[in-house]
Amino acid sequence: ISDATNDNLRIGTRGGNMNLFSVTDAGAASPLAFEGSQFNFITGNVGIGTDSPDHLLDLYKSTSTSGGSTGTTLQRLWNYVGSDLSQQKTFVDFVFQDDNANFTPQVRIGAEVGRNGDANAISKEGAGAFVVYTSNGTDEAGSGELAERMRVDYQGNVGIGTTSPSNVLHVKSTTLNNGAAARIENTRDGGGDHGLQVIANGSAGSFATRIQQQGAGDILQVLDGSAEVFTI
């Protein structure tokens, strides 16, 4: 394994794929395979657990996972931050780029440690949230803004437009689009279909639906098509 013309170190084969073998007393196994007669990190496919990778990175593991089991972890992203956790995040970025001055990444997904940013205790360091970021576009100079749009927090609450959801679904908007923070639309023409169905099993004093107006506007407006039925 050498290159007589320069100081580079090359590992390759005369033809076919290249496999890296681990050898034990029981024989040789091939946990890592590179596709191509001359593998490189630019054009080669990498297979871990398979000797025939079809993509840039293929992870394969044969397991006895059953339909009733908790599942199998094929990959772990591990971020060691030192002596103490506080509010760290770990991300995977999605980048789309051409020859223009693009702002990247356009999409980012990741994990945040703690209870919605609070990991100031050992018990809270075991909590976490899944977060989704998107960018608001690119101007001619290639600048943009990447911001969190959605999260599933440590309690399973889903927040859209908020980093601290207080309900199972919490939607918050400070820049309304078409005058509504949320829109539910059912375009299927079926006899028993509903645009929204609310089912509650609360005790006395609870509500199936509660509408709270905190400003000077009306509480509720009902329309039939574009015609107003009533406004409260």
Image (spheres, rainbow, N blue to C red):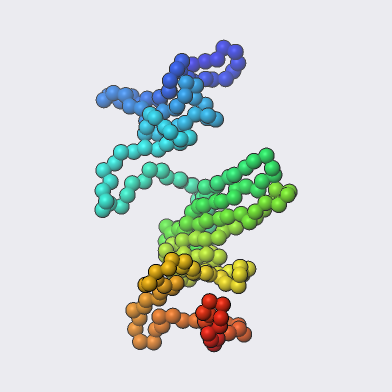
Is residue 23 visible in the rendered structure shown here?
Answer: yes
Query: Measured along the vertical axis of the image, is residue 138 above or below residue 98?
Result: below
Query: Measured along the vertical axis of the image, is residue 42 above or below residue 191?
Result: above
Picture residue at 48% right of the left edge, 35% below the top: 56
Front in this rendered view, residue 97 or 71: 97
Picture residue at 55% right of the left edge, 86% below the top: 231
Quadrant (top left/top right/bottom left/bottom right) for the C terminus: bottom right
Q: Quadrant of residue 219?
A: bottom right
Most extreme residue toward the top is 4
Front in this rendered view, residue 215 or 115: 215
Picture residue at 46% right of the left edge, 68% below the top: 186
Front in this rendered view, residue 167 or 95: 95
Residue 180 lies, in percent from the top left, at 57, 72
**Does residue 151 appear left or right of residue 98 in this picture?**
left
Is residue 121 visible in the rendered structure shown here?
Answer: no
Residue 127 lies, in percent from the top left, at 43, 59
Picture residue at 49% right of the left edge, 29% below the top: 44
Query: Measured along the vertical axis of the image, is residue 192 above or below residue 232?
Result: above
Front in this rendered view, residue 102 or 122: 102
Residue 80 lies, in percent from the top left, at 49, 47
How many numbered tags mark residues here? 0
**Does residue 167 appear left or right of residue 22 in this picture?**
right
Residue 208 lies, in percent from the top left, at 40, 80
